[in-house]
Image (spheres, helix red, strand yellow):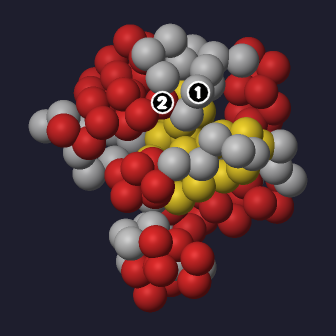
């Protein structure tokens, strides 16, 4: 059975590019362009992963991520945060299952998705880069 992934990204061009890559890798894709549709899809459909843009959604990615994490139906869905360089937040690292810096290569996207789907998380301190391990 193929994994179902929600792409929560306001930029339609970016969403389409990610969708194409992931469909070619045989994933089942859902899309959301705003917080409301992201949360609604996460609450009503079985999702294996959410790819969440941390800035472009109308309420901001951190608010969306927190709502996903405290939701009864959404708390256990892995979330891979996507962001431009310089927008890294340790808070995102603590609440997410991974971090993907834009712009990214197709290979980076696929590797990050695979890791998130297979249980890798920033919360696994032994797998954190030394700089992040020292910060926490």
Quarter containing the C terminus: bottom left
Residue 47 as seen in the image, left or right of residue 99: left
The residue drawn where x is 59% and y is 55% is 99
Residue 136 as seen in the image, left or right of residue 76: right
Q: Which residue is mark 1?
A: 55
Quadrant position of residue 107? bottom right
Secondary structure beneath label 1: loop
Disc number for residue 69: none
Please report whichever mark, 2 or 1, sits nearer to the chain's N-terminal start.
Answer: 1
Q: Which residue is mark 2?
A: 61
120 lies above or below 95: below
Q: Give the x, y percent position of residue 14.
A: 77, 27
Furthest residue to the front? 135
The residue drawn where x is 26% and y is 42% is 69
Q: Give the x, y percent position of residue 87.
A: 64, 41
The residue drawn where x is 27% and y is 30% is 67
122 lies above or below 106: below
The residue drawn where x is 48% and y is 23% is 60
Tell me, yes or no, whether the two marked residues, 2 and 1, touch with CB atoms within 8 Å: yes
Closest to the observer, 117 or 61: 61
Q: Give the x, y percent position of residue 110.
A: 72, 58
Residue 83 visible, this angle: yes
11 lies above or below 111: above
Q: CA distance from mark 2 to mark 1?
A: 5 Å
Secondary structure beneath label 2: helix
Furthest residue to the bottom? 126
Q: Residues within 10 Å of mark 1 (few under 14, many from 20)?
A: some
Residue 26 visible, this angle: no
Q: Give the x, y percent position of residue 41.
A: 38, 23
60 lies above or below 22: above
């Amino acid at each position: 059975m193929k994994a179902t992934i929600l792409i929560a990204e306001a930029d339609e061009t970016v969403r389409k590019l990610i969708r194409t890559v992931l469909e070619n890798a045989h994933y089942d894709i859902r899309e959301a362009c705003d917080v409301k549709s992201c949360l609604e899809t996460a609450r009503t459909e079985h999702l294996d992963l959410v790819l969440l843009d941390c800035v472009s959604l109308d309420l901001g990615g951190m608010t969306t991520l927190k709502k996903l994490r405290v939701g009864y139906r959404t708390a256990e869905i892995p979330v891979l945060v996507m962001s431009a360089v310089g927008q890294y937040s340790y808070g995102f690292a603590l609440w997410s299952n991974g971090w993907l810096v834009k712009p990214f290569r197709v290979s980076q996207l696929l590797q990050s998705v695979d890791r998130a789907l297979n249980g890798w998380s920033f919360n696994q301190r032994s797998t954190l880069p030394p700089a992040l391990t020292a910060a926490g």
